[in-house]
Image (tube, rainbow, N blue to C red):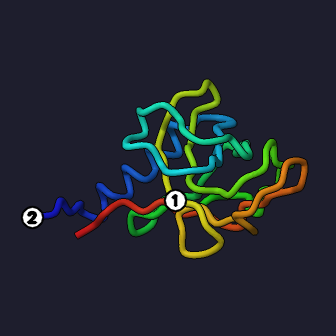
Amino acid sequence: MAVRLSASLANSLADAVDTALGNAGTIKVYTGSQPATADTAESGTLLATFTLGSPGFGAASGGTITLSGTPLTVAAAATGTAGWFRMETSGGGNILDGSVGTSGQQINLNTTSITSGVNVTITSGTITMPTS
């Protein structure tokens, strides 16, 4: 059987993600495959680091939080194909990992083909907790 959360608990957990980010948390985009857990060391090349506002996400609804302040644009730090992202606190503590793409992913970028020194943009982002 799958674990399913009540809408209230899903909203609380989703809001807790934003609270855990604190002021100026980051989303880091890497090449390659997502590690087994968010506690596993990063793999791949760090392509871009986006600093989030405070709060980084709007209030949860239906167990989903939506990234605030999009689009977010930075100059890429390296060249490669975006494969996954990691959210971290401003102090570098891991919060969660997820998928990147140009649509239908947790973090959507203007392109997954990233070139060093060229702007890359987060166009949207949502994190959803499982509900019943």
Check disc 1 and report the residue beneath it.
99
Location of residue 7 with respect to 72 vertically, above or below = below
Most extreme residue toward the right, as rendered?
117
Q: Which mark is in front, 2 or 1? A: 1
Looking at the picture, which amino acid does disc 1 mark?
A: Ser
Picture quarter with the C terminus: bottom left
On the question of residue 55 being in view, the answer is no
Q: Residue at x 16, y 63 (%)?
A: 2
Which disc is residue 68 wearing? Answer: none
Q: Residue at x 72, y 42 (%)?
A: 49
- Give SS at disc 2: loop
Location of residue 2 with respect to 104 vertically, above or below = above
- Give SS at disc 1: loop
Return the x and y of residue 42 as percentages of the image width and height: 53, 35
Q: Is residue 106 left or right of residue 6?
A: right
Toward the viewer: 48 or 9? 48
Q: Is residue 37 left or right of residue 66?
A: left
Toward the viewer: 12 or 76? 76
Q: Within 10 Å of the Cα at label 2, are there few (<14), some (14-19), or many (20+) other Cα atoms?
A: few
The image quarter in which residue 88 lies: top right
Picture quarter with the N terminus: bottom left
Return the x and y of residue 50 as percentages of the image width and height: 73, 46
Return the x and y of residue 9 as percentages of the image width and height: 29, 55
Location of residue 20 with respect to 8 vertically, above or below = above
Q: Residue at x 72, y 53 (%)?
A: 80
Check disc 2 and report the residue beneath it.
1
Toward the viewer: 61 or 99? 99
Looking at the picture, which amino acid does disc 2 mark?
A: Met
